[in-house]
Amino acid sequence: MNQDINIRVVNSTKDFKAFVKFPFDLYQDNPYWVPPLINEEIETIDPKVNPVYQNAVARFFLAYRGDVIVGRIAAMINWIEVNEVGKSKVRFGWFDVIDDLEVSKLLLEQVRLFGQEHSLKMIEGPMGFSNLDKAGMLVEGFEERNTMITLYNAPYYKNHLEALGYTMNAKWVEYEIKIDDFETSPEKVKRFSKLIMERYQLKLLQFKNKNDILPYIDQMFELLDETYNKLQTFVPIQKYQIEHYKKRYIRFIHPDFIKCIVDSKGKLIAFSITMPSFTEALKKISGKITIFNFYYLIKALRKNNRASFYLIGVHPDYQNKGITAIIFNEMQKLFNKRNINIVETNPELEENAAIQKLWKNYENRLHKSELHLLKRSKNNLC
């Protein structure tokens, strides 16, 4: 019976902290769940901090059984997506539950009602406010740790949503790439990289410090828009979001791991952001950075045999012309220099044949996949 499950709207500071900390209890004994930074999670959902609320609204819910939290969910509407992109959609994210279908049903019902209030026609998730937030429901790779920019969930989540009428809207995959020494790395990639650089008169930029990178960040975000604006989940990135993410992530950026390619006129045509893996460090600090555990983050930056691809942007005029081979060839040199032998790709669409063709040149393993799930109504969500 469901009368012992109580859904409450999150309003107070205390409630927001409970909302963010719920997964810490849910997954406390799970060796594969990697916790986010608590303060960053709170800032992301706080209207006073996150400028996304200039063009978005959200409501947050907690499910209680007695005095015990048994689930959480966020319902969000990105008005740029609704009004400019033309998608009549309410998003759901920050979705975590115990293995009880009734809890999932009641939480997702709150999302439906929130969408109904605004006359929307479909529900999609898990996702955040924009393309720059974490997204996707894990459906393969439950014995793999999530990275700093990906989510983890238990296997039963998918069963819950399918039982409630949600269907797949998009599938994303992640690969683990083995990095050999540069001398024995694929000659095809090295030759092709050199050929493409010469054919299109391209130049690779090398950065010595963070200040060298700053003049290119706005161009990177512009390239992200141009690279991904055809994706079905794409929403244009706003100027205020760029400024917000600059401040939020610049501390994690290491200049060695940023690769930019410009054309003969100095215009940015491609970039990649890769970082040493923070997975192990985040697991150890368990959501809080203190003067005592900051050491783990520093160690991850300086001495690490794993790395993660975070973002790759390529101008449409240069897509499918081998630019990713240049990026990966340059990253390989860096990985070898830093004794990094394993790289995780960021989530990429399953049908992205071009990038997956590059991975086939290396020893690789498809080790995770995620879904975006959708529920649609012919009329409003009623």
Image (spheres, rainbow, N blue to C red):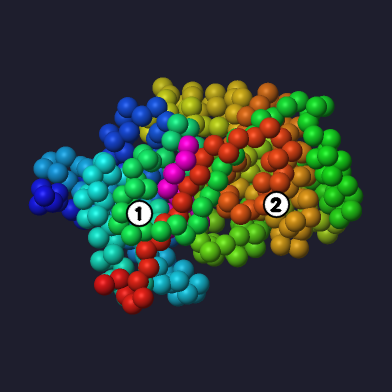
Q: Could you tell me which residue is drawn at 83 percent across and 39 percent down?
A: 188
Q: Give the side of residue 180 with respect to residue 33, left or right.
A: right
Label 2: how many Cα within 10 Å (few below 14, some 14–19, many 20+): few
Location of residue 32 (image quadrant): top left
Outermost residue toward the bottom in this view: 379
Q: Is residue 282 magenta?
A: no
Q: Is residue 239 left or right of residue 198?
A: left
Residue 134's spot in the image, x, y percent? 46, 49
Q: Nearer the viewer, residue 300 or 196?
A: 196
Which labelled disc corresponds to residue 172?
none
**Majority secondary structure of magenta residues:** loop
- Seen at 38% across and 45% down, the residue is 41
Q: Is residue 325 above or below residue 78?
A: above
Q: Residue at x 55, y 27 (%)?
A: 300
Q: Name the residue type under label 1.
A: Glu
Q: CA distance from mark 2 to mark 1?
A: 31 Å
Residue 230 in view: yes
Indicate yes or no whether the magenta region holds residue 140.
yes
On the image, the x and y values in percent for residue 236 come to 54, 65
Total labels: the figure holds 2
* Residue marked by disc 2: 354
Q: What is the x, y in percent for residue 287? A: 38, 34
Residue located beneath label 1 in the image: 162
Amino acid bearing label 2: Ala
User: Magenta residues?
Assistant: 127-141
**Residue under the point 73% across and 58% down:** 319
Quadrant location of residue 105? bottom left
**Residue 159, percent across and down?**
34, 48
Query: Tag 1 or tag 2, which sits nearer the N-term?
Result: 1
C-beta proximity under 8 Å, tags 2 and 1: no
